[in-house]
Image (cartoon, grey):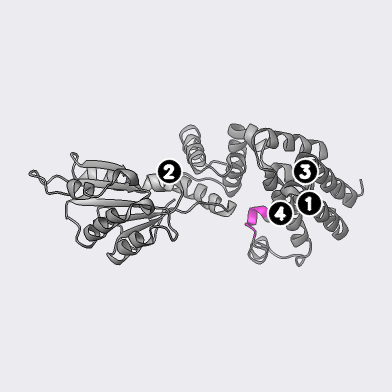
Amino acid sequence: MATRKNPTDDLLAPITLAVGQEDLLLDRAVRDVVTAARSADADTDVRDLTSDQLQPGTLAELTSPSLFSERKVLIVRNAQDLGSDTVKELKAYIADPYEEITLVLLHAGGVKGKGVLDAARKAGAREVACPKMTKAADRLSFVRGEFRTLGRAATPEACQTLVDAIGSDLRELASAAAQLCADVEGTIDEAVVGRYYTGRAEASSFTVADRAVEGRAAEALEALRWSLATGVAPVLITSALAQAVRAIGKLASAPRGARPGDLARDLGMPPWKIDRVRQQMRGWSADGVAEALRAVALADAGVKGGGDDPEYALEKAVVAVARAARASRGR
């Protein structure tokens, strides 16, 4: 969910600044303002412009007083790409905005067009952060927030399974959460998510890793082929394998008898993952972890240009990890 950096909750503030490159969050920032404006005045005039449509003089025309004093919402997308003359006009308006007009500026952030950012912030604009969610933990938090917003309870395992199944597309994650809430009564758990998205879950990089560290080579290879066939990047698979093996190594070296909550804090894992890794690590040895990590490192180099066949490198790594798991178990 988009997070406000400015403490004000006034959706009809004279200026809203949405900063980032996550399209879903940018669109929601716009939607929230437009909805609030139309709740205040059903006849609100909404103008949605790209940077190339806002030419010198356009802003003055759009903000000119109306005989009927109608409320307006002006949306400017890609504000970082505005021309210098338009930026001058925009800065002048930002310094002295009109009461019945709400200006929404969408800016990618960064150095380009920073003058617009600085001017809006100096004027006390309401700011909404809309960053790309490149980390799995951020996407997991997003899914949890979606369920909370929809007023539904979902277990941590269900949220993780949904992220594993859908991937990094926030629109698809939001749509999947909404679909589950519409179709399922009661608490949404891992089994429910699995039934709805089993095909995609089986194709995820994390499923490949889970089956490999459990010593289930055939299932891991099947999941690997599904992943590659559905477009999962090879580097994501080596990353998932490395995370799974490292998690086993971390938990194996943790103090015996420690509580899951304490382990979660010390190892940087959610409590539910501690339970899953405990089941996976049974029988793993320190030598097996070291062997598996070496195999994954070789595969990682192979998929990043160090080899001619990334798929073969991944298959070798999956087999090696599963073999290490079986050897550690003595079978």
- Residue type at mark 3 is Leu
Q: Which residue is mark 2?
A: 150
Provide the secondary structure element on which disc 4 rests: helix
Pick the front one: 91 or 229: 91
Residues at discs 4 and 3 in contact (Cβ within 8 Å): no
Relative to 164, does residue 245 appear above or below in the rendering? below
Prevailing secondary structure class for the magenta stretch in the rendered image: helix
Ranked by sequence position, the earlier of labels 1 and 4 is 4
Q: Which residue does the image show at 22% across and 49% down from the upper left?
A: 59
- Residue type at mark 4 is Gln
Within the image, what quadrant is residue 269 found in? bottom right
- Residue 171 pos. (x, y %): 48, 40
List the single residue furthest toward the right: 330
Mark 4 surroundings within 10 Å by alpha-carbon count, few (fewer than 14), some (14 through 19), many (20 or more): some
Q: Is residue 162 magenta?
A: no
Q: Which residue is mark 1?
A: 296
- Residue type at mark 1 is Val
Q: Which residue does the image show at 78% across and 44% down from the upper left?
A: 212
Q: Which residue is mark 3?
A: 314
Q: Which residue is mark 4?
A: 243
Please name which of the two marks, 4 or 3, marks the residue nearer to the observer.
Answer: 3
Ranked by sequence position, the earlier of labels 2 and 1 is 2
